[in-house]
Amino acid sequence: MMESAPNPGTAPPAATMPAGEYLARRLCEAGVGHLFGVPGDFNLTLLDTIAATGLLEWIGSPNELGAGYAADAYARRRGLGVVVTTYGVGELSGLNAVAGSAAESVPVLAITGSPATSSVRAGRLVHHTLADGVFNRFERVYSEVTIAQEVLTAEQAGQQIDAVLRAAIIARMPAYLSIPADLATTPVDVARLETPLLAQAALPVAEQVFVEAAAAVLAGAEHPVIIVGHIAARFHRAAEIVSLATAAGIPIVTQPSAKGHVDERHPLHAGVYAGDMVDPRTAKIVEAADAVIHLGTVMSDVLSGFWTDRPVDPVTIALTAQGAYIGGELVAALPFPQALRALHAAATGRTRTASFDPGPPVNDTYPNPGGDLTQATFWQTLQAWLPEHTALLADTGTSFWGALALTLPAGSDLTGQPIWNSIGYCLPATLGQAVADPGRRPVLVIGDGAAQMTVQDLSPIARCGLTPIVILLNNAGYTIERVLQSPDAGYNDIAPWPWPQVVGALTGGRVAVFSVKDLTGLRVALEAAHDLRTMSFIEVTLGRDDAPPLLRALAERSGAGK
């Protein structure tokens, strides 16, 4: 029997792959190697489809909030993180984490498995809903905290996946992707992968306009300064920033949210800037500057020293994630990396070299008061011990405001949440940090109140065989709240936990536990933890009302601003 010849007027069928596989391949292209989340019946087909590719490793968490925090920390290192939840109950449990990512400019893709399209069309009363046939309310909730939202359709699946990924990566903001249970395997044209996810057209005209405008501001400046914020850190442009500063002889100060992004030992690094609250030296440098370059800054209450920062004026140059401004006016809609390149071109034409006196080191915040174990001697001891190439995480409260006065060693940075300030963030974030950046050992400092929020995430840390050093500051409750107001109020008390037993139970005993109450014990525990190749947990008992100096400064400003 003869085979019929193909119709020359009919194109061969396009090669396709399941939407879940297409998503996995695009995520790999964006540098993602892991997914954080919690399974649920509406996302199981998606997870099975992704698992079949072998491209992404699943990191399960005890709950969606912790998974979101872990994805946030992962994204800070990799440029994109992913949290996968199920519809309604799961995505709402993770909402706080995604909102924090929005506040802190972190590109997290929030994927939720949602009810099948047939159920949505019929308005069926299914579980994980309010049993009223309304299916778009959670998408609307997420529209408040994400830069882009898509509910996958069979007709536009590939375009929608690409759109949310591009939006998150370019803007360094979270995005939302809802995948109905019956569309995880919907076919997507393989040819779409031939176009790079982030293929962008050059903007030579806009770039040149900004170069000329910035050069005019910088040309005669004798005392310019660069202020580095956390949005710059999200783009991982430390080398370019230092190159810019070095070429033009411009000192650098960093906001608390970007501490460690620029090597603090560099001769042009002048300290941490938060108005006049954290470091008077940096405040003087910024106030005296005749040109101020903001690289990805956000002047929130805490980051501005409660609005004691220098206001925008005609010699203020500012780069955001997607725009270059002078004097508060948009000059060019340039992505941050391109705007930074243009700024480098403008600054290298300077004929003057700036000079500045950095003054005494920030570490004078922690003079040695004697031999007792206090907040001051704890941080002084940590400063002396902290190894190079450490990923330091410090949770909201005494931990972050103590760590802020450290001088970080080479290859180290600080992760915290000074805008969103959700206590407990840093413990699950340690999971995300360790997975994203296995070459650096995390050191987490967290208070007992914060740890009680998210302590269950010690379990996946142990299960994954990760080896962070966790330092718990046990000061019998919410010390930051006591410092802010009503130190003896009962609402700042928490139930005391037997931490060695709790930690042992959550990790299956795969942890070295130390409990210290004096400086000698602290030094011994830190050295022992450093030498061990396992997770270590150090409980440090401190006074209930003892607090780092910068936390007390924060409390004074906060009270005055009420």
Image (cartoon, grey):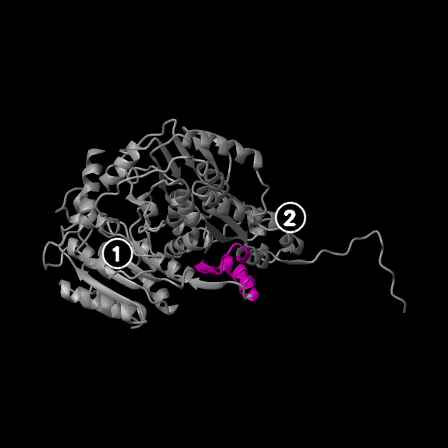
Q: Secondary structure at mark 2?
A: loop
**Relative to residue 51, is residue 64 depicted above or below?**
above
Q: Looking at the rendered structure, which numbered label has been put on residue 155?
A: 2
- Name the image quarter holding residue 319: top left
Q: x, y (%) of residue 500?
A: 22, 68
Confirm or deny contact between disc 2 and disc 1 (CB under 8 A).
Answer: no
Q: x, y (%) of residue 437?
A: 41, 60
Q: Which residue is mark 1?
A: 446
The magenta stretch spans which residues? 28-53
Q: x, y (%) of residue 36?
A: 44, 59
- Name the image quarter holding residue 318: top left
Instruction: Inspect the magenta stretch and tell me whether residue 444 lies in it.
Output: no
Q: Of tags 2 and 1, which is closer to the observer?
A: 1
Q: Residues within 10 Å of mark 1 (few under 14, many from 20)?
A: many
- Distance between mark 2 and mark 1 Cα atoms: 47 Å
Q: x, y (%) of residue 401?
A: 24, 48
**Residue type, mark 2 in image:** Glu
The quadrant the N terminus occupies is bottom right
Name the side, left or right, on which 274 lies relative to 51.
Answer: left
Is residue 239 visible in this depiction of the protein? Answer: yes
Q: Secondary structure at mark 1?
A: strand
Name the side, left or right, on which 87 lies relative to 265.
Answer: right
Q: Residues within 10 Å of mark 2 (few under 14, many from 20)?
A: few
Q: Nearer the viewer, residue 48 or 245?
A: 245
**Relative to residue 51, is residue 351 depicted above or below?**
above
Q: Nearer the viewer, residue 232 or 150?
A: 232
Q: Earlier in the sequence, mark 2 or mark 1?
A: 2
Instruction: Inspect the magenta stretch and tell me whether residue 39 lies in it.
Output: yes
Q: Residue furthest front?
A: 351
**Residue type, mark 1 in image:** Ile
Q: Give the residue at x 30% y 46%.
A: 421
Q: Nearer the viewer, residue 500 or 44?
A: 500
